[in-house]
Structure formats: C-alpha cells, structure tokens
Image (cartoon, grey):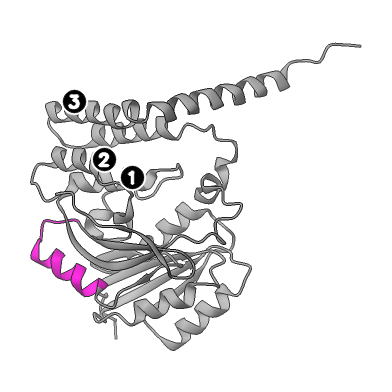
Amino acid sequence: MELRDPLVSIGLPVYNGELFISRALDSLLMQDLQDFEIVICDNGSHDSTVEICTAYADRDNRIRFHRNPQNIGLVKNFNRTFELSRGRYFKWAAHDDWHDPRSLSRSVALLEENPTAVACATGVSIVDEHETEFDRWIPTVDLLTPQAHERFHRLIWMLGEPHLLFGLMRSSSLRKTALMQRYLGSDRTLLAELSLLGPIVHTPEILHFYTVSTVARRNYRPSLHYDPKNRSALPLRTYRLIYKHLEVVRRSELAARHKLFLAGSILGRFGVRDFRRLAAETYHTGRILAGRAASLRPKPAR
C-alpha cells in the first residue's frame, strides 16, 4: 500500500553532531502534531552521528536517514534535505537546536489561517551549549502587507537576524526559489525571495531554542562550511549580497517602478548602511589580489 505524504517535512542537515543531535531529535519527536517526517542528511560525519541517527531511524519510521558519501558542503546538504522531502510544509531544523512541543502545531495553524502566506516565524531563545539563554529574537516586522515590494523592503531593512530560515514554509513556495546558495548571506537572499512570493506570518511565542556553541565554532570558517569551493573566493560578502538581491528583484514579476524602488532600497541597505564593511572588503580584496599578482611576477635573475 502506498503511504500518504506527511503534512510536514523537517529537514535536519548534520555534520559531526554527536553532542546535540539526540536532543534535537527528541524535541522533534515530542511535537504535539504528529503528522510529519524527519529527513536527516549526514554530511560525511566522522564521529558517532551516523550510529545515533541510525538508531533513531530504526526506532521511528517517521525518520528517514540519508548519508552523503562525502562532505558536499553545508549549503548543498541543507538543500538536499528539502529535495528529499515530501510534506506540504517544510522546516529546516539545526542539529544543535531544539523546539517547543507546540512548534509545528502552532505554525501550521497560522499558515492554515492565512492561506496566501508562504512562511511562519516564531520567537527564538538564543542559548549557549549549557542551555543558558543570553538573548531573544522576537519577530515584530509586519510582513503580512499584500504589497510584495513593501514586504521585501521591510524584510531587508528591519528583520534583523535571519532566524526565519528555521520557520515553517510552504513547500510549494520554497520550491519556486533558488534555495540556499554557496555564498555567505544566501539565507537572507532566500528569505527576500520568499517575501516576494507571499505574506509571512509570525507569532512572538518562544518555540525555537537556537544554540550558539563556543565548542562547535572553534576554528569555524563559515565560507568553507557553506561550500569547500569557497577556499579561494575573495572576501566580497556585501558586494555579493547587493548583486544577489538585485538579481532576485530583476527576476521577479514586479512592476518596473517597484523594481526601481527596491533597487534603491537594496543599495541603501547594503551600500550605505554597511559602507564601512564594503570599504573593509574592498581593502582586503585589494591586498589579496596584489599578493596574487606579486606571486606571478618572474623573479629577477641572480
């Protein structure tokens, strides 16, 4: 008999997550909404992550475990969990976070109440590896306005940290985006792209506990974790964000006047407000290019 697709798919990408993966899975399995699947994609872990995930999958048939034969980078692994999913709704879950038991049911209810909405954000408690809270993120920006260009503008200027990436999304809407890309900040571009596709609802309830682990972040180089091919990439993060956001607007079906408005908004957000960062990136890129050019010059004969 063919199994019915689940209401919700949870994509859980993981790499060397033995310290926290059990806590993450336990919190998801204890959700009061039970119509879901968990798609785990292991990215070539060399600790006990595979054994832990395999044991969970053997115990609960809602868990589907996939292991990449080699590390394909964080971004491709994130996208892989969505590609393997089957649910009407989709949620990314980090392997070191955990969730309130009402997280799925509350988010699904809000999306069902707002059938044109593409995503739902919840309040986030930001904790350390000892589960001590040191900050909170509460979504307060109104992204329910029917005007797509206004949603985009408000999101890039006022949303703050991109915790909405771990909210609940309509799979049909997420499928229309470019998903995560290999450059730093592509989570922001993805959310901006989603905002053009429909309204975004939110609740201030703290339903997501986001771990910032000092242990996991030792020697952490985010660009390489996004994609190992970034090893030789120039440090032009803000320039890329400007270009990629402009690309999202260019590809959209917005009216020309709204595209022009958003082009100015993007340049103001990343070009003016982040001017110091742009200047620093320009300086460091110049030094790198000068060093590369110097290494190519023929050495004088002795």
Please name the residue that numbered disc 2 is placed on. 156
Q: Residue at x 28, y 54 (%)?
A: 175
Q: Which residue is mark 1?
A: 188
Is residue 85 visible in this depiction of the protein? no
Q: Residue at x 47, y 78 (%)?
A: 22
Mark 3 neighbour class, 10 Å CA radius: few under 14, some 14 to 19, many 20 or more:
some
The quarter of the displayed image where residue 209 is located: bottom left
Report the residue marked by disc 3: 260
* Alpha-carbon span between mark 3 and mark 1: 20 Å
Q: Is residue 156 magenta?
A: no
The verdict on residue 110 being magenta is yes
State which tag comes first along the sequence, 1 or 2. Answer: 2
By secondary structure, the bulk of the magenta-drawn segment is best described as: helix
Q: What span is in magenta?
A: 103-118
**Badge 1 local density, few (<14 within 10 Å), some, or many (20+)?**
many
Q: Are marks 1 and 2 in contact (CB under 8 Å)?
A: yes
Q: Residue 40: x, y in percent?
A: 44, 70
Q: Quadrant of the N terminus?
A: bottom left
Q: Amino acid at mark 1?
A: Arg
Q: Amino acid at mark 3?
A: Leu
Residue drawn at the location 49% of the way across and 27% of the way down: 280
